[in-house]
Image (tube, helix red, strand yellow):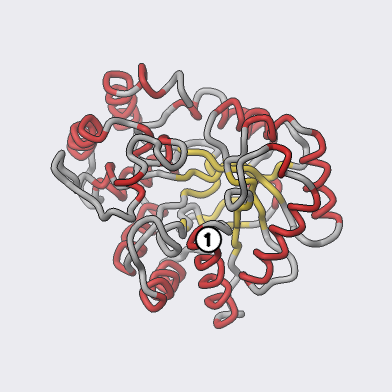
Amino acid sequence: MQQRTLGRTGRTVSVIGLGTWQLGADWGDVSEADALAVLDAAVDSGVTFFDTADVYGDGRSEQLIGAYRAEHPELSLTVATKMGRREEQDPANFTLATFREWTDRSRANLGVDTLDLVQLHCPPTPVFSNDAVYDALDTLVADGVIANYGVSVETCDEALAAIARPGTATVQIILNAFRLKPLDEVLPAAREAGVGIIARVPLASGLLSGKYTADTTFAADDHRTYNRHGEAFDVGETFSGVDFAEGVAAAREFAALVPSGLTPAQAALAWVAQQDGVSSVIPGARSPEQARANAVAGSAAPLGAPFEAAVRDIYDRRFRAAVHPRW
């Protein structure tokens, strides 16, 4: 497993991390035993970076990670959490007082005095240009409540606004073979500033696994059902914002490019991990087997220029016109 520096945090993390949205909610039920088994399998496979949020299962994901960390004090893990989506999405709610409330809850859930990394969780766009927000985050660092802060964004413009702030350690952004716009400006700007890039939704909600057909259905409590058209939150978070049938067809094309020895999902993760400037990629996993398979991408051989060109061709033909101007 390759290790990389997580931006301005200075911490070393695995290039393949673990996203834990699945362990909280919104992907169907996952038992506590199964969730802990996923964490164990990921760590056994070399993963040292977990990403969670206070809203995942209303804190359940954080609590599971906290329990796991307490049982394994010998491990050198970095846990990033996110805050701000449990409240009404009003820019006026993003204040030092509310940040203290939110981080106190996350510290209790995770069982720590100081949070490794706290990210604003896709807040309203005006938040990214508010000086008082960054002043409040700097205060939390000075007080020892958090060690570092970053942002999770929906758009490239939001990412660029955050990268320009000297205290921003990381930016979390959707990056996958069906979402290439961050390669144009965000990754170059982050590299120049020393800001880490955490790549989320790397499999486009599973599309890039190549396992879906146009007839595939999902549980009612799975966001791939209830947010397919952006009913609950930004549609870009579900299937990376692409039309499902078009995504299934594009995934078949992608699968045909995959070299022997890798699955389509592993190749998709490796492709993201091999983009210059990416610190860690955070696929989710609902089973130990899936966690172990994802980790393989962290030691995959370079996919090469022809693969890169083919990925861009698929994107340009199928998605650029709809996706590039929106996010």
Residue identifier under label 1: 50
Q: Is the residue 195 above or below the residue 77 in the image?
A: above
Residue 81 placement, left or right of 39: right
Q: Is the residue 265 above or below the residue 38 in the image?
A: above
Residue at image point 29% right, 67% down: 289
Q: Compare residues 138 and 72 and report the one nearer the observer.
A: 138
Q: Compare residues 210 and 232 and report the one nearer the observer.
A: 232
Residue at image point 40% right, 38% down: 231
Residue 282 placement, left or right of 301: right
Residue at image point 80% right, 54% down: 141
Q: What amino acid does circle 1 point to?
A: Phe
Q: Compare residues 307 and 212 and report the one nearer the observer.
A: 212
Q: Position of residue 304 (x, y in %)?
A: 34, 34
Residue 141 placement, left or right of 177: right
Q: Residues within 10 Å of mark 1 (few under 14, many from 20)?
A: many
Q: Position of residue 219 (x, y in %)?
A: 26, 55
Residue at image point 33% right, 43% down: 268
Q: Is the residue 2 above or below the residue 193 in the image?
A: below
Instruction: Determine the image quadrant of residue 28.
Output: bottom left
